[in-house]
Amino acid sequence: MDNRVVVAEDEPITRMDICEMLTGAGYYVVGQAANGLEAVEVCRRLRPNLVLMDIKMPKLDGIEASQILVKENAADAIIILTAYSGREFIDKVKEIGAIGYIIKPIDEIRLIPQVEIAIAKGKEISSIKKNLNSIKITCAAKEILMERYRITENEAYRKLRKMSMDKQLTILDMSKNIIDNIKSRD
């Protein structure tokens, strides 16, 4: 299911209002959190497309929680919610990799377009990360074949392609098998 959102906000009424705006616009609020630690745990478990994260929360602030989520790829995108518009906050948020920054009070007219764009960009970034990971895995398998058979990179790719066809696997799955076989020997 797409458009899965977690709302992390320590003010219960604000959290409830945001959830109502989101569900009214067709988004699935799959989790809620009242502090930064809860937000991290909920996102680790649910892997949402988007987290709306209050910047100032108890136990772990929104910046620290967002840093953890970005590092662990526990959400596709993060929008920071805040009452602060100071440059120091904006700079911190840019550093952690959040996709949006909404200044409170929050209304549906400002929230929904930000959410829509953040989810789209988050999916785009997630897709790029998956493609990069696939390329890294394929390159690692080619290097193993190059070393094992003392062949060029082009020859290794052709060999990898032939092996994948013979076993009726994707090149990515064949690459993973080659890497796993090397690891199991170590």
Image (cartoon, rainbow, N blue to C red):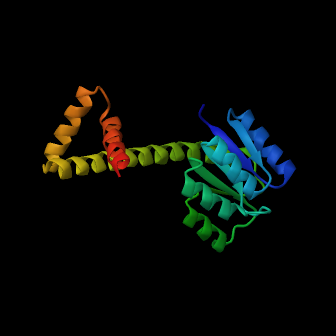
Residue nearer the viewer, 65 or 153: 153
Q: Is residue 99 visible?
A: no
Image quadrant in which you'd find residue 36: bottom right
> How many numbered marks appear?
0
Residue drawn at (73%, 64%) of the image: 61
Q: Position of residue 76 (x, y in %)?
A: 56, 47
Q: Is residue 158 left or right of residue 169?
A: left
Q: Position of residue 106 (x, y in %)?
A: 76, 52
Image quadrant in which you'd find residue 3: top right
Residue drawn at (61%, 43%) of the image: 47
Q: Position of residue 165 (x, y in %)?
A: 24, 28
Q: Quadrant of the N terminus?
A: top right
Q: From what the image shows, is residue 27 above or below residue 53? A: above
Residue drawn at (81%, 55%) of the image: 10
Q: Is residue 185 left or right of residue 112?
A: left
Residue drawn at (56%, 54%) of the image: 72
Q: Is residue 153 left or right of residue 23?
A: left
Residue nearer the viewer, 51 or 164: 164
Q: Position of residue 154 (x, y in %)?
A: 15, 45
Residue nearer the viewer, 147 or 112: 147
Q: Is residue 62 visible?
A: yes
**Outermost right residue:** 13
**Outermost front residue:** 185
Q: Is residue 131 left or right of residue 39?
A: left
**Outermost bottom residue:** 88
